Amino acid sequence: MITLRKILTIAWKDVRRTFTDRNLMLIMLAAPLAISTIIGVTFGGVAQGAAPVTDIPVAVVNLDEGTGGTNYGNIVTGILAPLPSDETGADPLEQTGNFNLDALTDSGIEAQNFVCPQSAEVTSGGAMQTSDASLDELLEGVRVTTPEEARAGVESGLYAVAVIIPATFSADVGYTPTDQTLTPTTIEVYADPNKPIATSIVRSIVEQVAVRLSTGNVTLSSVLTPVIPPANPNPLLILSVAGSQAFAQGISCTFEGVGSPILIDQQTVEGDEFVFNPLVVIGSAQAIFFALFTANGSASGTIDERKNGTLQRMAITPTPLVAILTGKLLSTFLNVLFQLFFLMVALTLVNTLIYGRLEFIWGSNIPLVLFMLFTIALGTTGLGAITAAASRNSEQANTFGSIIAIFSAVLGGAFGFQLGGGFQYLSVVYWGSNAFNKLANGNNDVLLNALVLTLFGAVTFGIAFVIFARRLKD
Amino acid sequence: MTAMVEVRGLKKTFNRSDGTPVHAVKGVTFDINKGEIFSLLGPNGAGKSTTIGMISGLVTPSEGEARIGGFSITKQAMQAKTLIGVVPQDIALYPQLSPRQNLDFFGRMYGLGGAELKKGIDEVIEFIDLKDRQNDRIDTFSGGMKRRVNIGVGLLHKPQLVYMDEPTVGVDPQSRRRILDTVFRMRDEYNMTVLYTTHLMEESQELSDRVAIIDHGEIIAMGTQVELMAQAGEEDRLVLIVTGNAPESLITTLGAVAGVTKAVREPAVEDADETRISIYAKSGRTTLPDVLRAANGSNATVSSVTVKEPDLETLFLNLTGRALRD
């Protein structure tokens, strides 16, 4: 009992020293948070500027059979993979939607100017101000006939992403006076998991188009329904309504971002359903990457304490060597665990700020998330501890630790790409971020990740312990 | 008297990276009595710190045994360690923490807690006279203040035996005086036994009830000051400094003066245009005028003369042929 208390005293002393050191806090928390946030903002569909990626190869399959002369699939296809004739600068939504404001104004009825209070983006006539001008540079869209061909192209590396629009797309989301029901539908985004940033960009564009399409229909429906009996769709009545202020307001506001009944079903080559959130994918990998530095630095603290004489001072007290080492390694583990926990919470808050909705981005299975946090901290600490134990001094430990952390991060996809070829399995960053990605997508099958991380952590911890003990006895 | 420390044939051999053994301590044996201030005096590298390391349980002896308060430091380490407080040579504190926080941490390592720990910390803070700075970070302290905290940590659990390993190294005279006074207070107010290592003869002479002189890992002399002076030969030493390189005939002349037992040329000081001559005599002060007359008669220019009564330095010189500070 007394020994346990001493172990906790040693661990608590180190944890307190770590979390009261402002410089360390900058490295441990602020840096990964800043990097993840920048990536999140840049690739999360929020940034309006050009992305630092160009010519993303996208295969687009439009199976949409259209309805009543309207084909929403063409709109999406026109945006992602425009034909030469489409590249005129005109907005495809204005040309092919089931409401065409130009047609209304040409008929002699002027829609009144109206700007929604929340938005300065929508102007006269409700034409959308899109960032489509940059899409030509961003995307290298190719129209493909069949889903099989598109998926095979992604698997072979020809395309980064395949976008597959279902046959019932227009029928599901289109509004007609006789069919005012909006049926949830799905656009499939089939992606190469090794190209998460490209996937994020394409998904973001598809999502934006989908939201705008569907909200346009929802608002049009809400405006017209009270005045037009579904059984008697009189074109003259429609035109007169279209000229009214209420209609202009309704049309303008259709382009405000609200919920969409169109789901983006993202699949990876491996077959997992996968919703890409850069804060989850990059954020978790960055968190583990920086946790590796913490683990290494914290474990190197044992070497520093030996150099400064405080370790010997502890050893002179009636405290067994095993307890001292256990306390030191426990503090390393706790430092990493708390760092990961804070980063997970902080990334959730960042996600809230970016997307404007409070959402726990790591999935709904909180106990499993916490358990994975524990195993990741164990694996990360083990790697840091063994690196420090095998080093002659803390300078050497920091150098080796940095090299190992960067290798792990590259292999594990912390910088937006993975080398693949099975090398990623050598990285704790991969096993950890992969588990968080699964959990974030509602996939609780993280047993293998937990096993690998726990075993790796236990073995490396054990070896580090023995090496440290031998060195301290010398 | 009851022995607080019993050391028997302690040896420590290290291996260099090329495998050659280094015999740091070659079998030292001594006792320290309860309430005694015992000095281990020797030049740098003599084996003082290794000896302390072994009897504090930090360094495993290659051979021999040490018992603290009757407990073997190797077989009953935990019991022995509760009796020991150590003040290491270098500052061994957490610089980011305050004196209070350092004391709190190490106090808990000794198993203290609650009101007992708080009271102990208050007493130590008072003892080392750092009440005003008790909550400031150590890395904002002067060297002397850090030394005082370093000592305080070693005293917190009220040990029966305190090892102080060259605690005045690199300390200004004022702080040094304060540390030496602290050692007396530890014995007089708390009845602690003190094992004090130093390479400074003056400190050893001022503090110690008994002294052991250690050189090349061996104890070459041990006893009270009086006993050691007797070993030194009870002769005074006159140190004569003459300008230029004195001829050998001057050394012979000075050695032949009545009352002088021998005259020795000391190693030359680099870049100094002078010669130091040690002259041993039963009574230095009585012999001094004759020595000066003899030097004058040999046309030597005497720039300085000092009369030194027998001391540990003399003893060390007699035993090893080297000065303590060489």
Image (cartoon, grey):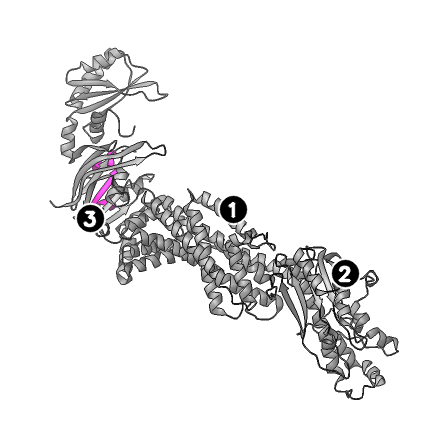
Residue at 60% over, 71% down: A357
Residue at 32% over, 15% down: B244
- In the image, is A267 to the left or to the right of B325? right
Amino acid type at image mark 1:
Ile
Residue under numbered circle 1: A403
- In the image, is A39 to the left or to the right of B84? right
Q: Which residues are magenta?
A: B181-207
Residue at 43% over, 44% down: A391
- Residue A128 sits in which quadrant? bottom right
Q: Is residue A348 above or below residue B95?
A: below
Are marks 1 and 2 in one subunit? yes
Amino acid type at image mark 3:
Met
Taken as a whole, is the magenta stretch helix, strand or loop? helix
- Residue A177 sits in which quadrant? bottom right
Asked if residue B252 can be seen in this view, the reply is: yes
Please tell me whether residue A331 belongs to the stretch shown in magenta. Answer: no
Separation of marks 3 and 2 at Cα, in angstroms: 85 Å
Residue under numbered circle 3: B192
- At label 2, counting other C-alpha atoms closer than 10 Å, the crowd grade (few under 14, some 14-19, many 20 or more) is few
Q: Chain of mark 2?
A: A
Which circle, 3 or 1, is nearer the viewer?
A: 1
Q: Residue A386, image x and y in percent? A: 43, 49
Separation of marks 3 and 1 at Cα, in angstroms: 52 Å
Residue under numbered circle 2: A133
Which circle's residue, 1 or 2, is located before the other in the chain? 2
Q: Are marks 1 and 2 in contact (CB under 8 Å)?
A: no
